[in-house]
């Protein structure tokens, strides 16, 4: 099974995943691949569960994989892990923005669930600005708020994409942060 944790910036995708990681027992194995001549971390693997991405900075998950062709590389590792019997979890804006074909293909082959964190847009913008403010202060630069048009467009786009995925047969769970965490835990207990 594959569990996609999606939502716009500021919804708490990475925070949710870190909470799930805290529940997993033991030290993970780091999954790497050579890509374009460079060894890259692709995932963390525990017995039965693989978490795609990296979690060594404030923004984490699959958004740390920003090279050309990263989505194809991520999908290849998802396939390898799922074929090996692992439940695969992944999150990030890159995942939220994946096209319908990729979701449908992975759902048809391995079974998938999309957990869309529904959080009020105003609070998402506030969370984005809090992060921007922290980064600006750490770098000694002036804080510039995010133009509200950007997260507003992304917010509505993530919901439209979820509707298309659901219509194509991918189970979609639209849930507030705490309920999303509970749903991911529930899905993991099924595996």
Image (tube, helix red, strand yellow):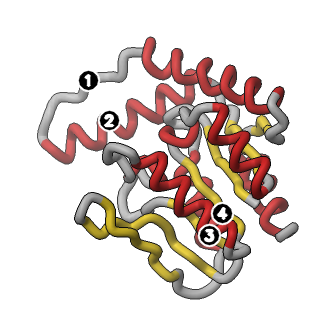
- The alpha-carbon separation of the residues under discs 4 and 3 comes to 7 Å
- First along the sequence among labels 2 and 1: 2
Residue contact between numbered discs 4 and 3, judged by CB atoms under 8 Å:
yes
Image coordinates for residue 62, horizontal then vertical, percent: 47, 52
Image coordinates for residue 126, horizontal then vertical, percent: 47, 29
> Tag 2: Cα neighbours inside 10 Å, few (<14), some, or many (≥20)?
some
Q: Is residue 185 above or below residue 155?
A: below
Residue contact between numbered discs 4 and 1, judged by CB atoms under 8 Å:
no
- The alpha-carbon separation of the residues under discs 4 and 1 comes to 36 Å
Which residue does the numbered mark 4 point to in the structure image?
88
Looking at the image, residue 113 sits to the left or right of residue 134; the answer is: right
Q: Which mark is residue 144?
A: 1
> Tag 3: Cα neighbours inside 10 Å, few (<14), some, or many (≥20)?
many
Which residue does the numbered mark 2 point to in the structure image?
132
- First along the sequence among labels 2 and 3: 3
- First along the sequence among labels 4 and 3: 3
């Amino acid at each position: 099974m594959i569990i996609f944790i999606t939502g716009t910036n500021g919804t708490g995708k990475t925070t949710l995943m870190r909470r799930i990681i805290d529940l997993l027992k033991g030290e993970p194995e780091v999954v790497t691949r050579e890509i374009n001549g460079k060894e890259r971390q692709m995932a963390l693997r525990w017995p039965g569960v693989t978490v795609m991405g990296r979690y060594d900075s404030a923004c984490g998950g699959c958004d740390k994989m920003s090279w050309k062709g990263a989505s194809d590389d991520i999908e290849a590792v998802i396939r390898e892990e799922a074929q090996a019997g692992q439940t695969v979890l992944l999150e990030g804006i890159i995942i939220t923005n994946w096209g319908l074909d990729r979701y449908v293909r992975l759902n048809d082959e391995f079974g998938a669930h999309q957990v869309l964190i529904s959080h009020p847009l105003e609070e998402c913008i506030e969370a984005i600005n809090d992060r921007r403010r922290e980064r600006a202060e750490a770098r000694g630069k002036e804080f510039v708020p995010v133009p509200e048009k950007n997260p507003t467009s992304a917010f509505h786009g993530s919901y439209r994409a979820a509707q298309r995925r659901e219509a194509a047969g991918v189970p979609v769970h639209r849930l507030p942060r705490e309920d999303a965490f509970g749903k991911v835990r529930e899905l993991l207990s099924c595996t």
